[in-house]
Image (tube, helix red, strand yellow):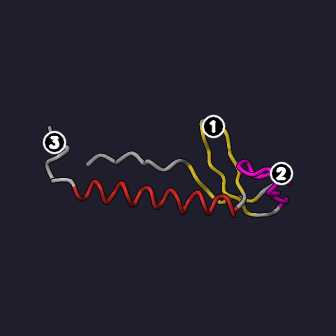
Amino acid sequence: MPYGKSLILNVAITTAGNSHNCRFNKSHRIMKGMKRLTVRVDGDNHNYCLGCGTRFLETDIGRLQTVLAEVKALPKDAGQS
């Protein structure tokens, strides 16, 4: 059976090597040594403070659960052609 493609981007919790601002909210400062959410997009790292990152993850988990519920509600042969 072939391996399925993941819909989740490359996401990880990393440690800041230097102090910088959160990519989403510039007033949130990430200090050197603090944990942050790092999302790799097209070879570029986007770093977010854990406050913003947590909200993103919670929202996305909710969206994925909604889509999964919709898929499960479809008849078993709905995607067959």
Q: Please tell me the numbered disc located at residue 68.
A: none
Q: Please tell me the numbered disc located at residue 20.
A: 2
Q: Which residue is mark 3?
A: 80
| Residue at point 62%, 45% (across, down) | 40
Q: Position of residue 12 (x, y in %)?
A: 61, 56
Neighbourhood count class around disc 2 (C-alpha, 10 Å): few under 14, some 14–19, many 20 upward: some
Closer-to-camera residue (28/13): 28
Q: Amino acid at mark 3?
A: Gln
Q: Give the extent of the magenta segment.
A: 17-32
Closer-to-camera residue (19/49): 49
Q: Position of residue 64 (x, y in %)?
A: 42, 56
* Among the two numbered marks 3 and 1 on one chain, the one whose residue lies closer to the N terminus: 1
* Among the two numbered marks 1 and 2 on one chain, the one whose residue lies closer to the N terminus: 2
Asked if the residues shown at circle 1 and circle 2 are in contact, with their CB atoms under 8 angstroms apart, the answer is no
Q: Is residue 30 magenta?
A: yes
| Residue at point 60%, 36% (across, down) | 42
Q: Amino acid at mark 2?
A: His
Q: CA distance from mark 2 to mark 3?
A: 49 Å
Asked if the residues shown at circle 3 and circle 1 are in contact, with their CB atoms under 8 angstroms apart, the answer is no
Closest to the camera, between mark 1 and mark 2, is: 2
Closer-to-camera residue (28/47): 28
Q: Amino acid at mark 1?
A: Gly
Q: CA distance from mark 3 to mark 1?
A: 35 Å
The secondary structure that most of the magenta stretch takes on is loop
